[in-house]
Amino acid sequence: MKNKIRSVFQNLSFQRKIIVISFVASLFPLLLLTFFSIGIIQHFIVEREKSNNQDNLTSTYQQINLRLTTYEEAISFLTSSQFLVDELAIENPSNFEQYDLYTNTIVPLFQSIYSQQETIANITLYTSINLYDHGKYVKKIIPGDITSHFKLNNTTNSSYFVDTDNNQIYLYSQLFSAKNKDTNIIVFQLSPEAIFDNLENISNEPYQLTITDAEQKNLFQFSNERPEQLGVLSRIFQRFNQSQIQNKKQLKNSWEITFSRPMYSVYNGIFLLVSAAGFIFLFAILMLSLSIIGLSKTVVAPIQKLADQMNDSPENTLNLKPTYQSNDEIGKLYQSFYQMIHQIQELINKVYKSEIKQQKHELRALQAQINPHFFYNSLSLINNKALLTGNQEISEMAQLLSQFYRLSLNNGKSRLSIAKELELTITYAKIQLKMHNYSFDLDIDVDEEIKQYEIITLLIQPFVENAIFHGIDHIEDQRRGKLTIRGKLLDNYLQFEISDNGRGMTANQLENILTHQGKHYGIQNVKQRISLYYGIQDAIVYDSTLNIGTTVRITLPKYTK
């Protein structure tokens, strides 16, 4: 199906191709812009509604908070009344003393609060003092009364208790006296209707207001949504989106106020703007269609003329490839230029091949300059001359050099056995021992079982060289240098350790030794070859302590011959 569509498109006339491409290329940005604009409109309207909700929520919060604050200040006035506290400090009051307490202290105080707060249903003192009940003003604490639900925390802070069964709210606070250890609680009985009065006309839009206490009990709930009064659009929106915009705010007594608006009511405001955007989109499509048709007619002729000019006089089009195969005007252009491009590419290939041949000749000439046979013969001659003159040191050095370069060249191969690599490394170390007048010790500890495996050439020698020139050569105290080479098998891996007791490295040197920031180019070369051959990046690990020494560990997968 995909190939069929491609074939049909390629065989369309150039004019129709312009129409299709231009229309598709313009339609998607236009659709994107339209939907983006609608999204922006929706976002701002929703944000505006959230802001309005927040304003309504703040207004509700302020009304309720003001009423609760008034009640709390009133009960705080009573609990902080030293006169009332002192009057309640009497022990075993007589009938007269009780009468005097009621008529001259408690009732006047409570009546003063009633006169200022008419919405308080009852103000009652619950006490454990041996007093007679006095109407709604004084009651003795008995098991099972309303105080059994209170959480007394031995402070004068006021708290709320919601009696959902009787639809009542109680505000209570304790009185304390140093002279009397009895329990005295002042309780305001509040009506939810009084606390939440005038909250039904916050907004003309559909909304729902819910107030819950700290235990998520409903204290108040109101909704002015009228499903039967919804218009056609609102019902459609309601059917497809029943979510709400919610704003919440918590009072200091842990009551939570939730103000929510249904999304369908918000979309009513968006609909007109979306309709306007839709008409603009259709108008833009119409203008786009007319523009594309006009563009296709005015562009085809110049391109046809350009194709004829290029067919008469081909120029620089080396990047043009014959990948466009169709019967329209552009296809003709490609067909006319293909022969010229093909000829140019043939000329380029001839020049490129001749340069490769020249480079091969130069490489062979360079190799001839460093012919290993010539080098071995020269060392053999030096060895013979040294033996004839009785100079054993020169003879040994020539033999070691010959052996080292024979092993390192490895007949041009990139791998060799660990046994040969070890022989090469030991030969190099012996040469360095002679050059250093045997000023350090060489310790070899390599398991016999790993010598059968193969590794890349010149793997260990650069680290030995590094240990001598950058470690042992820089010992500043009286220690004798020591170079240790270890090798062992760990599961499916080969591990080599090259250790020296030289001057060690600082943390900065240790960090840079395996990066291009350092000067250890031989180590960099080994790291790159390991990465290319084995495909691992962390095969080399350094461990060094300043003025104690350095150990490098090389861990590689094992390969047999």
Image: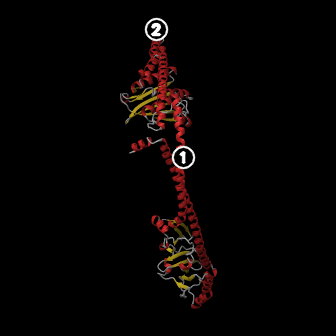
Q: x and y percent of residue 147 in the render?
A: 51, 79
Compared with residue 106, is residue 154 higher up or lower down, i.e. above or below? Answer: above
Identify the residue shown where x is 54% and y is 83%.
Answer: 129
Q: What residue is pinned by disc 2?
A: 388
Dividing the picture into quadrants, the one containing residue 76 is: bottom right
User: According to the image, what is the colour scheme of the structure?
Assistant: secondary structure
**Residue 384: mark:** none
Identify the residue shown where x is 58% and y is 66%.
Answer: 52
Q: What residue is pinned by disc 1?
A: 294
Camera-side residue: 522 or 151? 522
Identify the residue shown where x is 37% and y is 35%.
Answer: 492
Q: Quadrant of the N terminus?
A: top left
Camera-side residue: 32 or 354? 32
Decide: few, some or many residues near mark 1? Use Cα within 10 Å; few <14, some 14-19, many ≥20: few
> Between tags 2 and 1, which lies in front?
1
Q: Tell me the SS state at disc 2.
A: helix
